Amino acid sequence: MAFSEGKKFKKKPPRLQLEHKEFPVFYRGNMFKKTSHTTAKIKVFHQNDWIWKEIHFKPQDEYKRGVWNWKENNPKLVQVGKKFFLHVSYESQVKLNHTNIQNQRICAVDLGINQSAVCSVMDAKGTVLARTFINQPIEKDQLYTITNKLRKAQSISGRITAPNFWRRINGLQKQIVNDTSHEIVTFAKEHRCDVIVFEYLDQMKMPKGFWGAKKLRFKLRYWRKKGIQNKVEEMAHYLGMRISRINARNTSVLAFDGSGKVQRNAKKDLATFTTGKVYHADLQASYNIGARYFIRGMQKSISEKKWLALQAKVPELSKRTEQTLSSFISLNQALET
């Protein structure tokens, strides 16, 4: 019997639990045999014996994803609810594009408050070529209702786990993330973009005065934004597009025309400039996001001496948190002179 400091070891050694997030792999040859494009055999334990069981599957996913020439890895058994599925991963070498900054076309994405995402396609001259708004109002309305019910239940019963509430919340979150990510990548692909530009959100902090359901919704919105960025990065790399992130400070606060700070309405969807012009808040923020990406890329390709001379002509370039679309257009004009 083993002892430690006079006390008996009572804890059992770690072992594989029934509830875990890892699933068995059907290794090719001894557990999995593919007999045709739509049929295969897997070895399963049935009636106290290991037998080969034939399965049929649909090849639509291979057509949709274009993985016919990719290396097929061993399938993995995955349980979703009460059903079991075979997940097959494919492997290939994908080369990302190396387009020069002057020839790039980007998709600047602002993950806003009211809209899930607002995308703007821009070129190196500052011209906005296309725009789109992505939103899921039905899912967000359901999410708003569930979070209120969850906070009400917690206020009555304390900080309960509430698994049923969180199952519905996580399901809606996943739906919004997947739908938004696919819309962003599809939009960027249609307009032949080289780079998708996001805001860097790791320094995001909780605003003051947030509590209860409002605080929970802010957390869910932040997790949703990070999930969208991660999924878009995977999907964009699959297509050879690059991902970039820029400083997020003041992208929504400053007007894209260089007129100064904006005033947002109560719903946070419209911004009023100092000149009196009213514009969509998230759309004008996406302009600033794209402009900051191009300014940073051009600065890397210009010598320090020349950049200081350009800063004298365009003072806003000296501080990245003050750069807007107007600053980028002024930079292009200064380079031409």
Image (tube, rainbow, N blue to C red):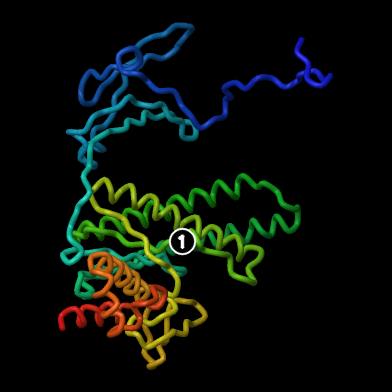
Q: Is residue 111 left or right of residue 314?
A: right
Report whether residue 132 is seen. no
Which residue is at a point 37% across and 74% down the rendered structure image? 285
User: In which quadrant will I find the N terminus?
Assistant: top right
> What element does badge 1 sit on?
loop
Question: Which one is nearer the viewer's eye here, 287 or 269?
Answer: 287
Question: Which one is nearer the viewer's eye here, 30 or 251?
Answer: 251
User: Which residue appears farthest toward the right when viewing the image?
Assistant: 6
> What residue is disc 1 on?
201
User: Which residue appears farthest toward the front when viewing the image?
Assistant: 305
Please tell me in which quadrant of the rendered image residue 117 appears: bottom left
Residue 219 x, y percent position in the rendering: 56, 59
Residue 125 x, y percent position in the rendering: 19, 74
Report whether residue 190 is seen. yes
Q: Is residue 254 left or right of residue 106?
A: right
Residue 57 x, y percent position in the rendering: 29, 28
Residue 150 x, y percent position in the rendering: 64, 56
**Dot 1 surroundings within 10 Å: few (below 14), some, or many (20 or more)?**
some
Which residue is at a point 44% across and 23% down the rendered structure image? 24
Please tell me in which quadrant of the rendered image residue 31 appears: top left
Q: Is residue 248 left or right of residue 329?
A: right
Q: Is residue 264 above or below residue 142?
A: below
Question: Which one is nearer the viewer's eye here, 175 or 100?
Answer: 100
Going by the numbered disc 1, the residue's amino acid type is: Leu
User: In which quadrant will I find the C terminus?
Assistant: bottom left
Q: Is residue 181 above or below residue 13?
A: below
Q: Is residue 176 above or below residue 63?
A: below
Please tell me in which quadrant of the rendered image residue 101 appears: bottom left
